[in-house]
Image (spheres, rainbow, N blue to C red):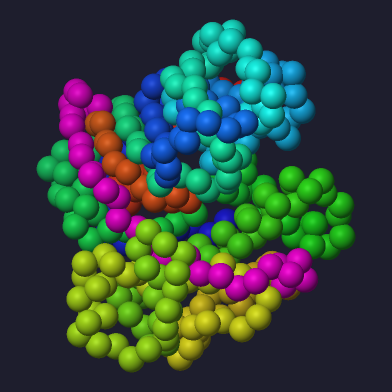
Amino acid sequence: MIPLPLAFGAPLLSAKIRTTPEDFQVDELPAFEPSGEGEHLLLTIRKRGANTVHVAKVLAKWAGLPDMAVSYAGMKDRHAVTTQRFSVHLPKRVAPDPALLASDEIEVVESTWHNRKLQRGALAGNRFKLVLRDVRGDAAAIEERLSHIASRGLPNWFGEQRFGRDGGNVPAALAMFGGRRMRPDQRSLLLSAARSALFNQVLAARVEQGNWDTPLDGEVWMLDGSRSVFGPEPWTDLLADRLGRFDIHPSGPLWGEGELRSTGAAAELELGAVADEQSLALRAGLESARLKQERRALRLRPAMLQHQWLAPDVLELSFALPPGCYATAVLHELGPVDDASQATPEA
């Protein structure tokens, strides 16, 4: 994996996170209100020290159903306290007692019926509360950096979670493209990792050039809070105003077959950033998998970014992010933050 550059200058702190699961709290922001009827039991669950797939398997066993009867909108970290929705398909509308799910790992916050299966990505975003411990750095400088992030936004990196332990998903993707057989779920994960690695390389090139949040000739624009894109088109005062209001963002490629939508200087930078041998192999593999060219915003603006010092060396951050964006992108702009949970062997 390439080292990710910083958009705002040198690191300002070092710290630890996830000393306890409570130091990393994530709450899904729901995208819809339950209908109150139907054959899908919609459960809002707060989990501690458990990953999403594990909880889904517990729900399937509780309901006496196959794993495929349980769905969720997004994956959530294991070493955290997170709140998220699951749906369980119960066509006869007979559900076991939710109280039977209660454990040190699982708490049922809400249970209601809905008329549709919960789809992946069916959330408005995520709200985070992070506690950094053993913070070393100048408090005033850290607060100034946070203010700068709140007003300008930051690069919209794919987080390290996308790439697996020690970044192993990208080499595994290359092996898959070379002919190694993978299960369908593994294949999907590795295709996403390959795309994400290429996107991060393009974004890194733009951060290094200082134009990750400013236009290039041939720019493709993404609407804030949407996957809709438009352009390229001539730069105008109207576009400048929309960019300044965070209504639109520059975008980068999620690689697949077909021509880049960008042109001119934007396309030249994008192609140049992914022209090394490994990137060419990833590009060829994604194209052979018949994925289509898509785009992702290069810029991210955390909503409601707040901070407070719980102690001279303990900093609490809270903010909300759109779906598919990573809290680690915010931490990256502050400085190296060690994940204490990685010192604990996986069960």
Residue 142, position as x, y percentages in the image: 20, 44
Q: Is residue 154 left or right of residue 38?
A: left
**Vertical order, 215 against 139 (above or below):** below
Say which quarter of the image contains residue 239.
Answer: bottom left
- What residue do we see at 39% from left, 29% from top? 25
- What residue do we see at 32% from left, 32% from top? 129
Is residue 302 inside the magenta stretch? yes
- What residue do we see at 59% from left, 10% from top? 97
Instruction: Evaluate whether residue 185 shows in this view.
Output: yes
**Vertical order, 82 against 264 (above or below):** above
Where's the N terminus, which quadrant? bottom right
**Vertical order, 340 against 30 (above or below):** above
Is residue 24 inside the magenta stretch? no
Residue 119, position as x, y percentages in the image: 58, 45
Say which quarter of the image contains residue 242.
Answer: bottom left
Q: Is 64 in front, or is 18?
A: 64
> The magenta stretch spans which residues?
285-314
Instruction: Evaluate whether residue 160 shows in this view.
Output: no
**Vertical order, 306 against 218 (above or below):** above
Q: Is 343 in front, or is 248?
A: 248
Residue 196, position as x, y percentages in the image: 57, 59
Residue extending furthest left?
A: 140
Q: Is residue 217 left or right of residue 202?
A: left
- What residue do we see at 30% from left, 75% from top? 214
Q: Is residue 293 left or right of residue 7?
A: right
Say which quarter of the image contains residue 347.
Answer: top right
